Amino acid sequence: MNKVKPTIEEIKEIPASNLITLGQILSNPPTTPESLLGDWLSSNTCTMIHAPSGIGKSWLAMGIGLAVAGAGRISKWQAESAKKVLYVDGEMSAHSRFKRLELLSKKMTFGAKSLLWKNMNIIPPEAATKIDQKTSIADYQSLISENEIGLLIIDNIRTLADLKDENSAASWSIVNDFLKALRAQCAVIVVHHDGKRSVYSGSSNAITVLDNQLGLSSLSVSDCNGQKIKEAGIRFSYKFHKVRDSFDDNVSGCIGFHDQYGWINNTNRETESRMNLFETKALAESGQFTAWKALASYLGITDQALTKRRKKYEELYGEKINLVPPERLEIDDAVFSNLSSVFCMPNQ
């Protein structure tokens, strides 16, 4: 039986609020999304970070949260301003969470470090509301509104949602409803595991509403360029498999987290040399050292090698590296922000 077309009278009965004409859309442009980190994470977007177990997806998610909270930097991704972050931890013990947050906050560089402590908000596993409960959308909407959250991070899907079957499209519907509702208020990142096919585990419906899909994979020492990333305890390659809005950033790359140096790039020899120069300048002006000899010792190089670095920097950039002793330096957020260029040079 053929379906009868609706009459003009029936169309008129449809609530006007459900209909938007092209004229209304083009004459009322929405607010431009605000950049939160680099040129891929912006307000009102949904992103999935997925990887096999043990690659470093929670390290990256937590680092992103800290960067957004304190106007910090991860590799070449910079947060221009500080926003409040809500990190929902569904799996870590209190000890593991403390150690990671302590190390990341010490080794990352921030433009607004004084805001970091109050901007980064954590919900531990024992207090976390699962995202697929009947009241979860309303609960999280209230949390976000009351605390003026700019970024919500759900780590991870398997611990914070009871999916009956990850491979079923229907199982993901309630998660997608959650993401669409929360995206209207803030940016949302969800962390998920890879399956046997080395892609995210589950139905294609799992990525339907996503704006960005960021996959991580292991990075072997043989694939590393530069001694620092070879020594990094956490290192991985990344690739954006889905980007709803195009951006100029590279869609793939390699980064790592070093216990001493923080987030670092996979570099070639020339880039590593330049990074060493910027590292030397930043440390010399940080107010930590009273003499060049102490700086050389910290860097693990000879006095002669340090002198060569200083001369090389002056040749390349036309200015000297000056040692600023502690008594001449007023420690504040601006000083810490000067370190943001260290280890964060773009890949060459």
Image (cartoon, rainbow, N blue to C red):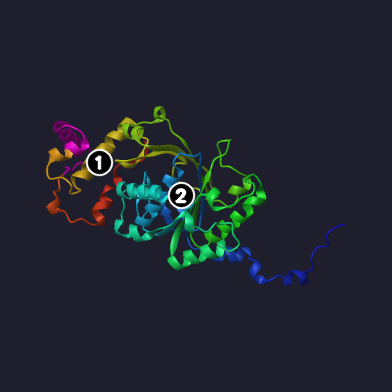
Residue at 87% across / 57% down in the picture? 1
Task: Tell me the tag on residue 279.
Answer: 1
Task: Tell me the tag on residue 40.
Answer: 2
Q: Say if the magenta span includes residue 319.
A: yes
Residue 59 screen position, x and y as percent: 41, 45
User: Height in image: 341 above or below 270?
Assistant: below
Callout 2 crowding tier (Cα within 10 Å): few <14, some 14–19, many ≥20: many
Q: Name which of mark 2 and mark 1 comes first in the sequence.
A: 2
Horizontal side of residue 138 vs 225, given as left or right: right
Residue 259 screen position, x and y as percent: 32, 41
Q: Nearer the viewer, residue 254 or 313?
A: 254
User: Height in image: 221 above or below 239?
Assistant: above
Q: Which residues are magenta?
A: 296-321
Q: Amino acid at mark 2?
A: Trp
Residue 32 screen position, x and y as percent: 47, 60
Residue 301 screen position, x and y as percent: 19, 33
Q: Nearer the viewer, residue 203 or 318?
A: 203
Residue at 83% across / 62% down in the picture? 4
- For label 2, the SS is loop
